[in-house]
Amino acid sequence: MPERFCFVAGLPRSGSTLLLNVLGQNPRFHVTSTSGVPDLINSVRAQWDTTLELKASGNDAAKRRVMAAILPAMYATVDKPVVFDKSRSWLPWLELLSDAYGDVKVLVPVRDCRAILASFEKLWRKNYLRWPAVTSEVHCQQQSVEGRCSVHLAASGMLCIAHNRVRDALLRGFRKSMCFVQYEDLCFSPAETMAHIYAFLGEHSFTHDFKNIKQITVEDDAVYGFGKLHEVRTAVVAGPDDWKEVLGPFGEQFARLNFTEQW
């Protein structure tokens, strides 16, 4: 049974897969692909609230125990002391995690939101054979770069949901539980960035090999409708800073969404 659980929950296209595969070089750490554990916890809560017998018992303590027991049960056979579970859905559950496990540590990958939208746009252009099924309304929006960005920034859009979750966790008072990992810092100053992460986690330092990244986490990206969503390079290097070319002048406005030191 692992000794502790840490979490990775931030913005999409911000290097979370790269970060986990770097962390996975440490023999103390077990790292995951995108996790479904928060969805299982949510399913238990929903089922509990719709089961007459459980509602009648009014046993909130048992409900909390059952929900909290899912995470350690998931990794009961892991033989490493630290588990990093990755899901952007963890942030709404920080109260439960704090109650169950005490001092919660969450790594929060972030990135210039203009670069995030450009990354989505480049994926859309590369995957013209596998566009996910969309409603007629979304189909109309996807006829331009501006429209495709608006899909990601709509209330149900991937970037909007993730951004709101990070912001909400901050407003709920969990800043000390969150370590922002700027994608650009990880790429250009990996050693310094990892040292900062280890200090935040309270773990002993480890010498990582940033020029020889072996991918540990594996996901079938076809289920998400796009290919190569979670593949990492064999070395920690920054991708092209090409959001201006990809988005055009329209992209500049999204700088306002970036998380800065004020947080």
Image (cartoon, grey):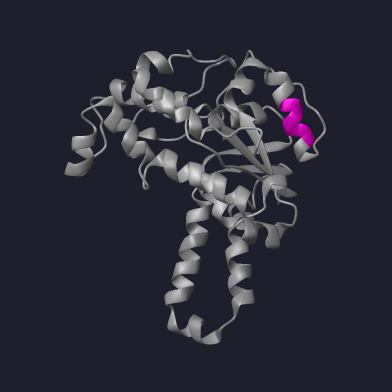
- Magenta stretch secondary structure, dominant: helix
**Residue at 59% over, 68% down:** 66
* The quadrant where residue 72 appears: bottom right
Residue at the far right: name it.
204
Residue at the far bottom: name it.
56
Q: Visible in this render: residue 230?
A: no
Position in image of residue 132 (x %, y %): 26, 37
**Residue at 44% over, 45% down:** 161
* The quadrant where residue 85 appears: top right
Describe residue 220's horizontal placement relative to residue 95 as left or right. Answer: left
Name the residue nearer the viewer: 196 or 174: 174
Residue 250 drawn above or below residue 148: above
Name the residue nearer the viewer: 196 or 70: 196
**Residue at 56% over, 83% down:** 58
* The quadrant where residue 59 appears: bottom right
Q: Visible in this render: residue 91?
A: yes
Residue 179 drawn above or below residue 165: above
Position in image of residue 11 (x %, y %): 51, 36
Please provide the residue range marked out in magenta.
194-199
Residue 212 drawn above or below residue 119: above
Q: Is residue 72 magenta?
A: no
Q: Give the tally of numbered discs.
A: 0
Position in image of residue 122 (x %, y %): 35, 21
Position in image of residue 174 (x %, y %): 67, 50
Query: Quadrant location of the C terminus?
Result: top right
Describe residue 12's horizontal placement relative to residue 22 as left or right. Answer: left
